[in-house]
Amino acid sequence: MYRTLTQNPQEHLVSVTAGEVKLEGNLVIPDGAIGIVLFAHGSGSSRHSPRNRYVARVLQQAGLATLLFDLLTPEEEEIDLRTRHLRFDIGLLASRLVGATDWLAHNPDTRDLRVGYFGASTGGGAALVAAAERPERVQAIVSRGGRPDLASSALPHVKAPTLLIVGGYDLPVIAMNEDALEQLRSLKCLEIIPQATHLFEEPGTLAAVARLASEWFTRYLN
């Protein structure tokens, strides 16, 4: 089903079936995992995003399995590099996330794990749409600098407890998330990280994101 990557014996390269396509992913399942978090990366990024990989390591240390995977095929990535339109196709990205969720449900190593979503930027919008489509499977959501405005029609249908995290200097995105918070009907929370911009590159800000996400997922996936 998968092969171990040489740089980390606990990390496995997997081929995730999502509808009619197969997507490359990196799966880590700690011993005694209490749940699994799927990562939906932001526009122009991939499963190799250093920010998401950092958050994933923190979650793994908290006993959570993680799946970071590419939302687009290599051919679609090439197209998107030229047109930049697929990264904003929230319906497509959400369908890939739903497909990965269904793939986990059929994987004997992950089918018994409760599922959470961690979305960044446009991936945050995709995570909310996908969660509305799989309310019985998705138990928790964390959005980092997300674009919930791209998921506006799905917001009232999200059932999972949702944590929205935004940088204090990311003023347009703060407004988008405040509007989304009003539309969400699930258990919800908005956390604003002081002195952080959209990518949380300032010292200590990404660590704050990882801590908040770890606490949220361990609370609602345990």
Image (cartoon, helix red, strand yellow):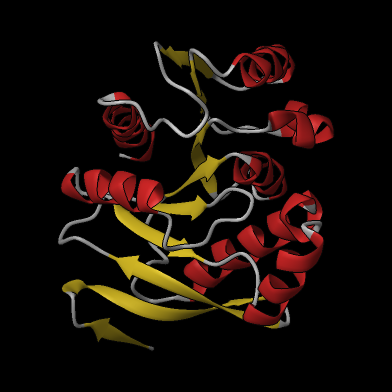
Most extreme residue toward the front is 82
Q: Left or right? Give the position of 75 relative to 8.
A: right
Answer above or below: position of 217 versus 176: below
How many badges with numbers are in the image? 0
| Relative image position of residue 165 (x, y in whole percent) | 48, 23
User: 78 or 42: nearer the eye?
Assistant: 78
Answer above or below: position of 88 versus 47: above
| Relative image position of residue 198 (x, y in whole percent) | 52, 29
Q: Quadrant of residue 87?
A: bottom right
User: 54 or 107: nearer the eye?
Assistant: 54
User: 195 or 55: nearer the eye?
Assistant: 195
Q: Left or right? Give the position of 196 relative to 149.
A: left
- Residue drawn at x 55%, y 52% is 40
Check the picture and name the quadrant holding the N terminus: bottom left
Answer above or below: position of 169 versus 127: above
Q: Left or right? Give the position of 141 relative to 195.
A: right
